[in-house]
Amino acid sequence: MFCFRCGNEFDDGANFCPKCGLISSTGKIAIAKAKKVDTKPRVSRVGRPFSYIGFGMSLGALLATSLLFSVLQAYQNSHNAADAIIYAFWFIMLFIIAYALDGVSLAFSIIGLKKSNKKAFAIAGFVISIVAIVLGLLCICFLPTNS
């Protein structure tokens, strides 16, 4: 086989001209086959664990936030000081746990949104975390005052 560009003779099975580097007809076929193999859509699974963790933690944060309302109700119905102190302690602990889970689940959900091509769990985790944050803030608004 002869090169079309420089006229150099090379083997029939060669993909490139050894002198000028021009792709031969067999090289074009090999490149076309390689492109067909390489052009398959690749699924990014890097962000999926972040999406799943963010979703699970947001559910935990929502659970902790819903427990806040139960503890708040029990605190408002308590009639002695010892029970009120215990309920106040649990309220504060659940509040810290809920907002820590919210922050981490938001971070994981955002990472999942950026790195995964399947974003359903990441979006659900993000939305549930925002709902839990809003519910927690509503819970603070209903705290009893000493007026």
Image (spheres, rainbow, N blue to C red):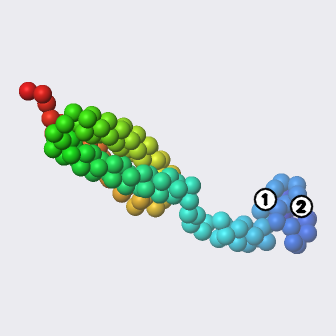
Labels 2 & 1 near each other (Cβ < 8 A): no
Give the number of marks.
2
Q: Residue at the spot x=15%, y=35% of the render?
A: 144
What is the quadrant of residue 94 in the picture?
Answer: top left
Q: Position of residue 110 (x, y in %)?
A: 43, 47
Which numbered disc flags the more N-terminal residue, 2 or 1? 2
Q: Foreground: 61 or 121?
A: 61
Query: Which quadrant does the C terminus fall into?
Result: top left
Q: Residue at the spot x=47%, y=57% of the render?
A: 52
Crowd rating for badge 2 (residues with CA inside 10 Å; few <14, some 14–19, many 20+): few
Crowd rating for badge 1 (residues with CA inside 10 Å; few <14, some 14–19, many 20+): some
Please tell me whether mark 2 or mark 1 is closer to you in this view. Answer: 1
Q: Position of residue 86 (x, y in %)?
A: 30, 38
Badge 2 marks a residue whose secondary structure is loop
Residue 37 in the image: above or below residue 76: below
Is any atom of residue 36 visible in this view?
A: yes
Q: Residue at the spot x=43%, y=56% of the render?
A: 56
Residue 135 falls left or right of residue 41: left
Say the numbered circle drawn on residue 75. none
Q: Amino acid at mark 2?
A: Asn
Q: Foreground: 139 or 87?
A: 87
Per the image, the residue denoted by label 1 is 22
Residue 3 falls left or right of residue 72: right
Q: Position of residue 127 (x, y in %)?
A: 32, 52
